[in-house]
Amino acid sequence: MSIHELNDNMYAACSGRMRGIMSKVRTRFAPSPTGRMHVGNLRSALYEFLIAKHEGGDFMLRIEDTDQERLLEGAVDIIYHTMEKTGLHHDEGPDKDGGFGPYVQSERMKTGIYMKYAKELVEKGEAYYCFCDKERLSTLKTEVVEGKDIVVYDKHCLSLSKEEIEANLAAGKPFVIRQNIPNEGTTTFHDELYGDITVENAELDDMILIKSDGYPTYNFANVVDDHTMNITHVVRGNEYLSSSPKYQRLYDAFGWESPTYIHLPLITDENHKKLSKRCGHSSFEDLLEQGFLTEAVVNYIALLGWSPEDNQEIFTLEELIEKFDYHRISKSPAVFDYAKLKWMNGEYIKAMDFEVFYETALPYLKEVLTKELDFRKIAAMVKTRIEIFPDIREHIDFFETLPEYDCSMYTHKKMKTNADSSLKVLTEVLPLLETQEDFSNDALYELLLGYVEKEGVKNGYVMWPIRTAVSGKQMTPGGATELMEILGKEESLTRIRKGIELLSQQ
């Protein structure tokens, strides 16, 4: 055993959360199929994947569909598609039985596992049957918890005798099973980032474990499934910190060893508000539709709450596996900086193989351009100038049609050009271009360079007005001669004559 491994084991033993020196790290991603993959969910999946793979462990996919009312048709397919596309390949799941299935909670429910464990808690006095109807529950007081009105149950049914409970069950009276939390004392649990957290039991409500429809609640099913599937590390958002004492009480009630808890920081928008669907880029699918590359999204999401020891920002998935240390996850909220993501995506585009880039860019080129132009040269021209693929449109639209533009664009302080000097340049280079047979970039540049040397001016003094005339834009993906090569001789001359006409009217 290496010194590094020994230190890790000593740390785990001291923290009281060690499953044995030789235990294998097992993490799970347990999404609910309720729609698109939120950025926060994808981050949880990524961190769980990285923790497992960094330690040579197993990464599991489990579908949590106990909340039947929120299920969305096709959402399971979205989960599989996202996992496959991002490279977060699971070792076990509904499609890969590793001996701990079923891996879908509704299927697990059919085995009776949740009711079995709930009844075990009832026998231990750690849970009880509750037969209260909606009318009685409506009379109970409520508390506002995280912006929601929560009914505080008063333990009314805890006092029912065994005979009363059996009579109600025999009569088919609807019931739920509630966790029995004492009114006195405290509960303590440990989180790897937040340390030991202790809460007063009086602050905890007797949460429902089994609903009236027989389905387990999300919280109860999580605990049962994580234990029976040998999950060692549970990674989730810190909004679940308030529920963790209840989880801990369940582990303690069963006599089970609790997993290693890692609660992740909140992801906010630029205004430091929780990232919501209204922002337009809260889901993985949103970002793909906006032209982001999968690799860039995964890279960026990895940095939403975690940072490496050095200042490296661009990572492959393999590099993330190698360097990921969950102890470096921050407790502070992570700001989703859309501009930073665009920059990172641009870096990935720059590094793309040209053929792959061209195939991806081609639909955007064809969307804007109907003329017979050299698409490959245009693609090469924009590759280093865009951050997301839809940016291509605004960079190339002038190739299709010369836009209306103001003659003030010919004035450029750095190039020392103005309307008069630009008119002179365009008028004098026009006949040179009219007699030029070779309209390739190199030949055109050589021709205009001769004019520059003859006039004793700088390159920009000549190239700026020509580029303005042929593009009608202040920013273009290429220089004057590159643009003219793509536009061709006839179109280039037509646009230069148009520029002369506009300048002459000043």
Image: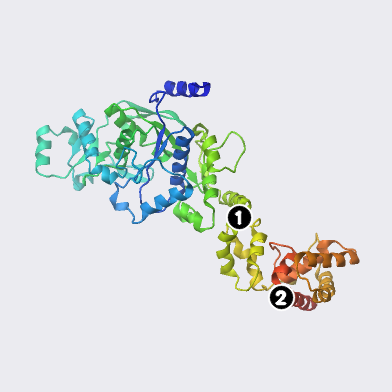
Pointer 2 residue: 491
N-terminal of the two: label 2 or label 1? 1
Residue 416 screen position, x and y as percent: 83, 63
Q: Position of residue 309 (x, y in %)?
A: 59, 33
Expressed as whole percent of the image width and height from the top left, the position of residue 217 reads 28, 42
Q: How is the image coloured?
A: rainbow
**Residue 20 in sight here:** yes
Q: Quadrant of the C terminus?
A: bottom right
**Residue wearing tag 1:** 387
Q: Is residue 411 visible?
A: no
Q: Position of 466 compared to 217: left or right?
A: right
Q: Which quadrant of the figure has residue 419? A: bottom right
Residue found at x 60% / y 50%:
348
- Separation of disc 2 and disc 1 at Cα? 29 Å
Question: Is 392 on the left-hand or right-hand side of 68?
Answer: right
Q: Nearer the viewer, residue 491 or 339?
A: 491
